[in-house]
Amino acid sequence: MSAWNPALSCANEAQVWPSKMAALTIKQAKRPLFIMGSLLNEIPQDITDKSLKIVKKKKIPVIATGGSNLALDRSNFKPAKTMGVIEIINHLKNPNWKGLDGKGNYDLVCFIGVPYYLGSQGLSTLKNFAPHIKTMTLCRFMHPNADMSCPNVGYEDWLVWLDEVARYLD
């Protein structure tokens, strides 16, 4: 008999978000923030470009973490800030944090490219200690600690999903 693993046993029951709902959530956010992680350096550049297309449509500030500046530089994109993912999670937990621009905390935080083990813990922290923030992952694999997540998909389906999110933002 094996131990019960909630990550494996409830994956089929967890609610994942179709691209249209993800786009609607981004559209409705008053103060969204995008966190881009180091995995963008290890995957094809088209994922970074598709993510930046989403960012640019809504003019979302981006925090580069874990050296993701390399991938962003290849796309000629300058993030609002470069910061460690743990540091930004600690700021986001504080409802009185004034944000990167001094106008207040964020209501939606989107993650892409943050290593799963680090993203999972960060999302768990926000879920339990930052009820004022909704979280979304645009990663290829479902994150059970996020409020909204892309379903587990193959690479080609992930490209289509990201394209649809960007298209629905129009």
Image (tube, rainbow, N blue to C red):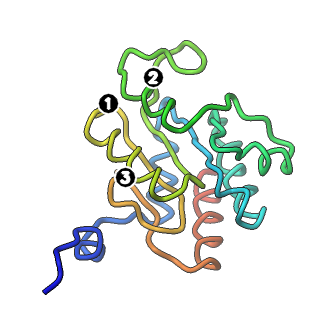
Q: CA distance from mark 1 to mark 2?
A: 9 Å
Res. 135 image quadrant:
top left
Which residue shows up at 73% across the image and 57% down it?
41
Which residue shows up at 79% across the image and 35% down it?
78
Question: Residue 9: image x %, image y %?
Answer: 23, 76
Q: In the rendered view, does 26 fall on the left or right side of 6?
A: right
Residue 83 lies, with reference to residue 149, above or below; the image says above
Q: Which residue is mark 1?
A: 132
Q: Which residue is mark 2?
A: 105
Q: Are marks 1 and 2 in contact (CB under 8 Å)?
A: yes
Which residue shows up at 45% across the image and 25% down it?
91
Q: Which residue is mark 3?
A: 146
Q: CA distance from mark 1 to mark 3?
A: 13 Å
Decide which of 165, 137 is in the foreground and name it.
137
Decide which of 148, 93 is in the foreground and name it.
93
Which residue shows up at 44% across the image and 70% down it?
151
Amino acid type of the residue that numbered disc 2 sits on in the rendered structure? Asn
Q: Secondary structure at mark 2?
A: loop
Q: In the rendered view, does 73 fall on the left or right side of 143?
A: right
Question: Residue 80: image x %, image y %?
Answer: 69, 29
Amino acid type of the residue that numbered disc 1 sits on in the rendered structure? His
Of the two numbered discs 1 and 2 on the same chain, state the one appearing first in sequence: 2
